Image (cartoon, rainbow, N blue to C red):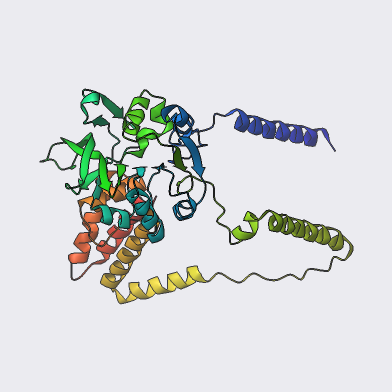
């Protein structure tokens, strides 16, 4: 090996080591994912709150639930009074879980739920509605409680808040315990911003027990518990009677670690899991040692030719020759709208101001650029005939939006 080759190899090794060291010492980016699990120390985890529960409820035994609501409530001792605590981004309960939870409360127990939604069946039963005021720009929300003991106390939320609130409640059985105040913007020149106050924390009586419902789960996350808002969480928990047992739900969490493999049953059974791993390991050893002794000649297989590009060019040429720009534009618009529905989960059935705001927010594009594109698409859909220039202009705008 000559001197020049040695220098190249040394430089390559030094560069690779530099890249590895840089990746190791680089600060890990903050994970803002809402998980609300008891073990997550990320901003929107619930590690701090979970570890403070014995202090907040000194008379209660904290039981961490790692299974469905149905399994817990069907197997529990019904003579033992208990509380059930749910904190999640969205609580999705099936029919059986909802019925068991309603029976649990009807018997005289308390369920505390902090989420931006509680599932359609539970909301229908309790006769409540929830709405959210999304904003393209993250603003500040102020929380307060209605009880005289908490008067003049406010709690500020500045990040991760969707301004969720109760839009309707059953006034015969519901008491409003707290509000959320935020600034709502319509993004229209003739309508200025307005500050609105909506209920976000209520108590609903059901049978002998009660539901305590909050639409602001962010207030119970690590980020706000450590920023001076821990008093808000303890104040809302003061409405819960300290009983012998407190269930902490760690199963319905959006951030819990689950096995979604088709092999999940095998991997959840210790004996089957080890048998599976040993089988895979045995096969790998067999292939490794057997393959080295009896390696056959591998025939060369020509890969299938990708003719999709030629097909697209041929179809495009036919449209160009026939000058059927109207059909071509309609197909391109339908394809673009389908792509937006698939990629960003935006409802394009009705193209209105809310659609524009959601599409701009989820795609990360400028609101003005998104608005011009949607307005241009609406104009083209309303025209009975189109020109080549319309087709070119539509292609330019869609290409610019997807870049």
Question: Residue 55 placed where, x, y %?
Answer: 45, 26
Residue at image position (21%, 47%) is: 173
Q: Is residue 340 left or right of residue 193?
A: right
Question: Residue 395 placed where, x, y %?
Answer: 33, 59
Quarter of the image with the N terminus is: top right
Judging depth in this view, the residue of 277 and 391 nearest the camera is: 277
Residue at image position (39%, 34%) is: 242
Judging depth in this view, the residue of 214 and 131 nearest the camera is: 214
Question: Residue 223 placed where, x, y %?
Answer: 41, 30
Q: In which quarter of the image is residue 139?
A: top left
Judging depth in this view, the residue of 6 and 90 nearest the camera is: 90
Residue at image position (44%, 37%) is: 244
Residue at far right of view: 293
Residue at far front of view: 79
Residue at image position (86%, 63%) is: 290
Q: Can residue 398 be seen in this view?
A: yes
């Amino acid at each position: 090996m000559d001197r020049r080759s040695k220098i190249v190899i040394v430089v390559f090794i030094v560069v690779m080591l530099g890249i590895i060291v840089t990746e190791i010492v680089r600060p890990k980016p903050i994970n803002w994912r809402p998980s609300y699990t008891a073990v997550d120390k990320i901003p929107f985890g619930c590690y701090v709150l979970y570890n403070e529960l014995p202090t907040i409820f000194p008379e209660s035994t904290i039981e961490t639930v790692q299974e469905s609501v149905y399994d817990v409530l069907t197997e529990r001792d019904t003579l033992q009074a208990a509380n059930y605590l749910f904190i999640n981004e969205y609580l999705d309960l099936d029919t059986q879980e909802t019925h068991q939870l309603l029976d649990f409360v009807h018997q005289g127990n308390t369920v505390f739920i902090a989420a931006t939604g509680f599932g359609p069946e539970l909301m229908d039963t309790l006769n409540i509605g929830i709405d959210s005021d999304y904003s393209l720009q993250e603003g500040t929300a102020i929380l307060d409680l209605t009880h005289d003991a908490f008067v003049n106390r406010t709690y500020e939320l500045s990040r991760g808040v969707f301004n969720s609130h109760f839009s309707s409640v059953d006034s015969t059985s519901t008491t409003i315990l707290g509000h959320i105040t935020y600034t709502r913007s319509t993004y229209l020149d003739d309508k200025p911003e307005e500050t609105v106050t909506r209920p976000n924390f209520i108590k609903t009586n059901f049978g002998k027990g009660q539901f305590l419902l909050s639409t602001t789960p962010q207030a119970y996350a690590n980020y706000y518990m450590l920023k001076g808002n821990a008093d808000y969480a303890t104040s809302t928990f003061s409405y819960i009677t300290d009983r012998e047992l407190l269930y902490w739900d760690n199963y319905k969490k959006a951030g819990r670690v689950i096995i979604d493999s088709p092999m999940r049953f095998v991997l959840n059974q210790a004996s089957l899991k080890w048998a599976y791993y040993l089988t895979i390991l045995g096969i790998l050893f067999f292939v490794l040692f057997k393959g080295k002794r009896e390696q056959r000649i591998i025939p060369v297989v020509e890969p299938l030719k990708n003719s999709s590009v030629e097909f697209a060019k041929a179809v495009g040429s036919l449209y160009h020759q026939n000058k059927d720009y109207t059909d071509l534009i309609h197909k391109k618009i339908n394809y673009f709208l389908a792509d937006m529905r698939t990629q960003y989960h935006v409802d394009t059935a009705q193209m209105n101001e809310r659609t524009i705001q959601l599409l701009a927010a989820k795609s990360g594009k400028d609101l003005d650029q998104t608005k011009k594109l949607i307005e241009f698409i609406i104009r083209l859909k309303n025209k009975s005939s189109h020109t080549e220039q319309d087709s070119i202009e539509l292609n330019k705008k869609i290409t610019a939006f997807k870049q």
